[in-house]
Image (cartoon, rainbow, N blue to C red):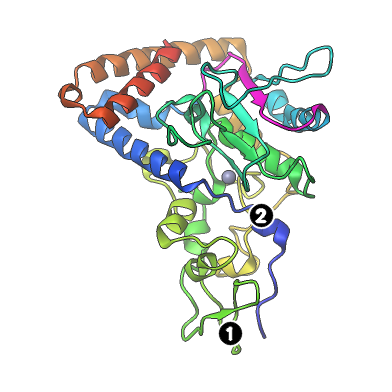
Amino acid sequence: MSLEPVDDALDEMLEDYPDDLAESLSQREAWRRQVADQNADLEFIIADLDRWPVGTPIKAAFLDGSDELHARIARAVQPIGEACGVTIDFGADHHGGFHRWTTSDRDYAADIRISFDQGGYWSLVGTASVDSSVGSPFGGVGGRPNQRSLNLGGYTERLPGTWRRTVLHEFLHALAFKHEHQNMLGPCQDEFRWEDDEWYVPTLDDTGRFIGDEHGRRPGIYTYLSGAPNRWSKAKVDHNLRSAGAEDAAAGPFDPASVMLYRFPKLFYKTDPSGCAPQGNGQDLSEGDERGLNLLYPKLASAQEADREKRGRRADTAIAAVESLEMLESADDGNADYLASTMQLLDRLT
Ligand SMILES: [Zn+2]
């Protein structure tokens, strides 16, 4: 019995940052960890700096696409604003037009800069979208005013059947959500079939995709994703599928109905049905998603005020700690960039 072909709609869901962006994010991550290790007050930079300030509208703008498409995206995102204290400002004016940004902007036209012209679907996580150290300065994707921060590839041509879910998924990333399969409290790490079946003979179909061999033995996740259409290295698989460190633990218990949980091909799971497979209708925010949103962005004015006060205090402490770091005096150019952009993010909170 050979492996059933994988539904293309599911495969499309595997997001993949452009290489220069992924490289830049891992360097920033390494810098943040190094800084946080020097002073406990700087843990904040890793733990809570990705989240936007609460109570302030988050501005979103489009690079390309029609007014009609923009209106559909804005409508699809509405449940987020209804569930929590976030206002995503698409700027619909009375002529039916929406905020726009361009690749020659020098100032931020928007916090979330949407495009449809790159391959695939992805979004920067939270305030990385306005972090000028994120992405190559010469690339089209990153945290600078003239760079894309959220892409919905090909939507100007056609909307896939799962487009509403994908839009919610990417906007939750833009609001600092991470993947549910990387939730430390979830079952996915133990449930994933990382390795090939024993004696698996690497077998490709005519599209270059790894499939089961003639004895029905299956490729594991590493092998499967190294083939078409993903062609991921082992490091990329680990980065995208393994749980992040404890510091990055998700806000709540594992939620199998979350829009942040992928529906992977069956060969990814050890068991069928798998506890790591999504439940729920797969289109709407789950109750867990709404709870998570409310934790990050409370609706009540009094809770917003308390959050602003607490984060402002922690940001002040972090700024003082950054200023006292000796390593920064000998900072090379790269470190100086990270430092400047981190201070900007901290300043927004004070
Ligand atoms: Zn994602």
Ligand 1 - quadrant of the structure image: top right
Q: Which residue is mark 2?
A: 12
Spatial distance from mark 1 to mark 2, Cα to Cα?
24 Å
Residue 260 in magenta stretch = no
Going 40% across and 44% down the picture, which residue do you hit?
Answer: 23
| Residue 244: % across, % down | 42, 47
Q: Is mark 2 within 8 Å of ligand 1?
A: no
Around disc 2, counting alpha carbons within 10 Å, would you say few (fewer than 14), some (14 to 19), or many (20 or more)?
some
- Evaluate if marks 1 and 2 touch, with contact meaning CB atoms under 8 Å apart: no
What percent of the width, then of the height, locates residue 90? 70, 21
Task: Write the residue at 47% across / 67% down.
Answer: 222
Residue shown at 16% from the left, 25% from the top: 330
> 268 or 246: which is nearer to us?
268
Name above or below for residue 88 compared with residue 186. Answer: above
- Residue 59 drawn in magenta: yes
Amino acid, disc 1: Asp
Instruction: Check disc 1 and report the residue beneath it.
Output: 213
- Measured from the top left, where is residue 302 in percent x and y? 57, 10
Residue stretch rendered in magenta on the structure: 52-67
Residue 252 in the image: x percent, y percent? 53, 39
Position of 113 compared to 337: left or right?
right
Specify whether residue 288 is in view: no
Q: Which residue type carries mark 2?
A: Glu
Secondary structure under tag 2 reads: loop
What secondary structure predominates along the stretch shown in magenta?
Answer: loop
Q: Nearer the viewer, residue 293 or 169?
A: 169
